[in-house]
Image: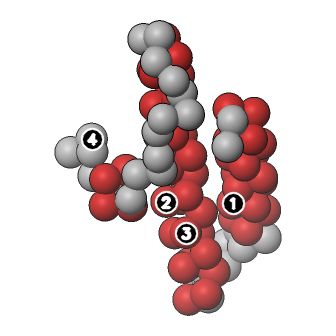
Amino acid sequence: MNDADIVHRIGVLADEEHSLERSHEGEEFSEQELERLREIEVTLDQCWDLLRQRRARRAAGQDPDDVAVRPEEVVEHYRQ
């Protein structure tokens, strides 16, 4: 996956997230919708993390393709 693919995936996921949120203004989400929102959130964090890894490697003169998607446990807790 290259940078353009990652950015496109981020856009698609963000659009889905916003659509779900807009469709429920003032209403409760179902359990399935809450789970989908959580999946989107995690995947967005993974995509942003992957893009940052690729850019950092490129800036350091290294191969940006030599990175991998980090697991949820990493991307959701690395700031803490």
Label 4, residues with CA under 10 Å away: few <14, some 14-19, many ≥20: few
Residue occupying the point 27% across, 41% down: 79
Which is nearer the eye, 69 or 25? 69
Q: Contact (CB < 8 A) between labels 3 and 2? A: yes
- Judging from the image, what secondary structure is the residue with disc 2 in? helix
Locate residue 30: give its quadrant.
bottom right
The answer to whether residue 7 is seen in the rendering is no
Which is nearer the eye, 15 or 72? 72
Label 1, residues with CA under 10 Å away: few <14, some 14-19, many ≥20: some
Q: Contact (CB < 8 A) between labels 3 and 4? A: no
Whole-Å distance between the Cαs marked 2 and 4?
Answer: 14 Å
Q: Amino acid at mark 4?
A: Arg
Residue occupying the point 70% across, 55% down: 13
Q: Comparing marks 1 and 4, which lies closer to the viewer?
A: 4
Label 2, residues with CA under 10 Å away: few <14, some 14-19, many ≥20: some
Whole-Å distance between the Cαs marked 3 and 2?
Answer: 5 Å
Q: Earlier in the sequence, mark 1 or mark 4?
A: 1
- Judging from the image, what secondary structure is the residue with disc 1 in? helix
Q: Quadrant of the C terminus?
A: top left
Q: Which mark is residue 79?
A: 4
Residue at mark 2: 42
Task: Give the vertical position of 14 relative to 34 (above or below).
Answer: above
Residue occupying the point 27% across, 45% down: 78
Residue 23 drawn at (x, y percent): 78, 70
Label 3, residues with CA under 10 Å away: few <14, some 14-19, many ≥20: some
Q: Which mark is residue 39?
A: 3
